[in-house]
Every structure is written in C-alpha cells, then in structure tokens.
Amino acid sequence: MKTVKSGEKSTASIKDVAEKAGVSTATVSHVINQTRFVAEETKLKVMQTMKELDYRPNSIARSLRSAKSKTIGLLIPVTGSDTSNFFFMSIAQGIESKLKEHGYNLILSNSNEDIENEQEQIKSFNSQLIDGLIIAPTGLDSSYLEKTLSGTYPVVFIDRKPRGFNGDFVLVDNFRGTYDAVQLLVKKGHRYIGYLTGTLGLSSVDERLQGYKKALEKNNIPLNDKHIREGKPSFDSGYQLTKEIMEEEKITALIVSNNVMTMGAMAFLQEKQMKIPDQLAVIGYDDYDWAKITTPPLTVIKQPAFDLGVTAGETLIERINNPEKVYSEVTLVTDMIIRQSV
C-alpha cells in the first residue's frame, strides 16, 4: 500500500481501506453508501481508516458529513510551571457545560505552549473523527495552522488570534484591561508606572502592552522603556523582574500582565516587606483565591474565563449546525476587582 505524502493526492483504494481496517471491501462499501447495517464500532473504524488514508471517492463526503461522533476537541497551551492552567480549566468547564446541553463530549489536549507539539496534537485530532475543535493557538503566524488543520471539521479560536486566519474567534478585550488599570492608577496620583509582561508575540500579550502604552499617552505621561520588563511567563521571572525594576527605577506603581508573574512579583515584594500601596501600588492579572489573602488583598484585572468557554461552545455548535454561517468575532470585557493594593 502506498504511503501518502503531505501535499500528494491520495491513491488509496477501497481495498487498501478494507485491508487496514480489517474488514471486507463490501463492509467498506456499506459504510460509504449506507446500504446495510454495520455495527457502530466497525463503522467508526472504517471511517477513521478512510480519513487516515485520505480515501475520498465522490460519494464519501456526504457520508462523512452526516456521521457525527458527538465529540469536540479542545487544545490549550499550558506549561508545567504555569498557573494559567486555572484560566484554561475555567474555560474548559464553560465549554463542557454548553456542549453537554447538546449531547457532545469534550476531549482535552495540551500543546505545552510549543508549536511542534501543537501540530502533532492537531494531527491526532484529525484522525479521531471529532466534529469540531476549539483551540488557543501557540503562535501568532497562522501559516502552520493552515497546513495542519484538516478542513474536515469547524474550528473556533479562543483567547488568542492568529494573524491572517479567517475563522470564528472568541476573545477577551486585553487592551481595555490594562488601559483601565493605568487609568485607575493615574486617578490615584501615579505617573511612574512599571509594567511586567510575558513573552511578546501572542495577540493577547501584545494587546495588553498596547493598552498600557495608550493609557500613558492619553494621560500625557511619557513612555519610559525602562519601566517595561519582558520575560518568560513564570513565577521566577516575575520575582526577578520585580527585583530588577525596583532596584533600578523609581516607580510608584506596578502592573503585572499575567497571573503567574504576579505571584512572583508579590513574593518578592512581601519578602522585602514592601508597604503596599504606600510604597508601591500593585495591580495583577486574573482573580484567583490567593489574590484575596495577600497582604494587602490584591487588585486584579479579572478575565471572564468561564463565560469565554460557554461562548466558544455556543459558537462551535452554531457553526456545526450552520456551516455556511458568516464567521464571527466575539470579544468579552474584563472586570477590575479593586482591593487594598492601590
């Protein structure tokens, strides 16, 4: 049997499908044409084999479209040391709550914030007969997605928006979140505002920095590049960057643009017994229980993670039921949870 290379047209025959699936060619024909009852397990095995071999006679497209697995894939980017898994788990709960209403099951996979791993996970989904995929992509460039996604199921992108990709998106207004944070600090009298960011290059990360810069401009505060520190989105990075900016710059307020770096920043400030907000006002990202028990309780930019998941689930169900529907982009707003750190 010939192996089909990427970009080649399949030359697999019905005999090849039958051989690999371990059934007769008649059974494959019955699955394709729905001319006789075939056990569900056998049917799924045959259909999966056809997908793996890219076997698509003229009559198969209708058959594959009409057969539903009632399974949706979810691909998230979480690393081992990243507390963003709380954020994405809240999204997953929202997605699952909506899918259950329509009788769908959810399969969760993790790219570990690695593009090559993400491609492998997508290829795995391509062979699992899913009815749709919800994904938070790891990269800003969409070319790798266009090459990897099979095109046989609808896709909804969440949290991050790949550049130049035409599809359904459910996002958070990251720009407004940090813009409002700066506005709050300015109203409190601050003009020397530091900013810690994770690695730039993702839409969500870039938009948060843009919101910070725009709010400074709006309030006629000169942009000081030394007040912006970029590093890996990790606890250690948050700790070290906070140490550096406090030792090197005279800032009166600090915005930390993701949850895990916020934890590192607060660890350093509490280690140094910094009086918050008297010596330094602090605003973090995402509202988890630990932020309520810091000294003092932390002001945060709260993302609507669960609602994002519900909306993503709704969007995908609508796309499955109405494939010709115009693509949509939904942007959910953040909330400022004000506590005693500003």
Image (cartoon, rainbow, N blue to C red):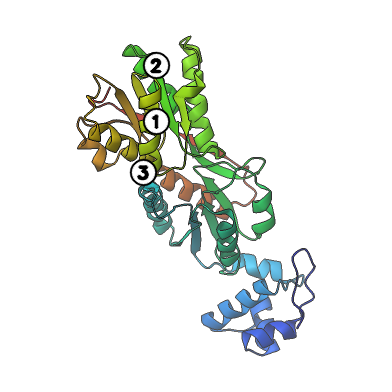
Distance between mark 2 and mark 3 Cα atoms: 24 Å
Residue 47, given in percent of the width and then of the height, sits at 62, 75
Can residue 223 be spotted in the picture? Answer: yes
Residue 253 vs 112, above or below: the answer is above
Residue 204, horizontal then vertical, whole percent = 50, 37
Position of 334 compared to 207: left or right? left
Q: Earlier in the sequence, mark 1 or mark 3?
A: 3
Query: Is 32 located above or below residue 90 in the figure?
Result: below
Q: CA separation, marks 1 and 2?
A: 15 Å
Residue denoted by label 3: 235
Q: Nearer the viewer, mark 1 or mark 2?
A: 1
Q: Name above or below for residue 176 compared with residue 66.
A: above
Left or right of 248 in this view: 61:
right
> How far is the residue under mark 1 from the one under mark 3?
14 Å
Residue 303 is at least partly visible in this image? no
Q: Which mark is residue 96?
A: none
Quarter holding the N terminus?
bottom right
Q: How packed is label 2: few (under 14 Cα within 10 Å), some, or many (20 or more)?
A: some
- Disc 1 crowd, CA 10 A, few/some/many (<14, 14-19, 20+): few
Dot 2: element: loop
* Disc 1 residue type (three-letter): Glu
State the residue position of label 1. Answer: 244
**Secondary element at tag 3:** helix
Q: Which residue is mark 2?
A: 192
Quarter occupied by residue 132: bottom right
Q: What amino acid does circle 2 point to? A: Tyr
Q: Quadrant of the C terminus?
A: top left
Instruction: Please say if the residues under marks 2 and 3 sit with CB atoms less than 8 Å apart.
Output: no
Sequence-wise, which precedes: disc 1 or disc 2? 2
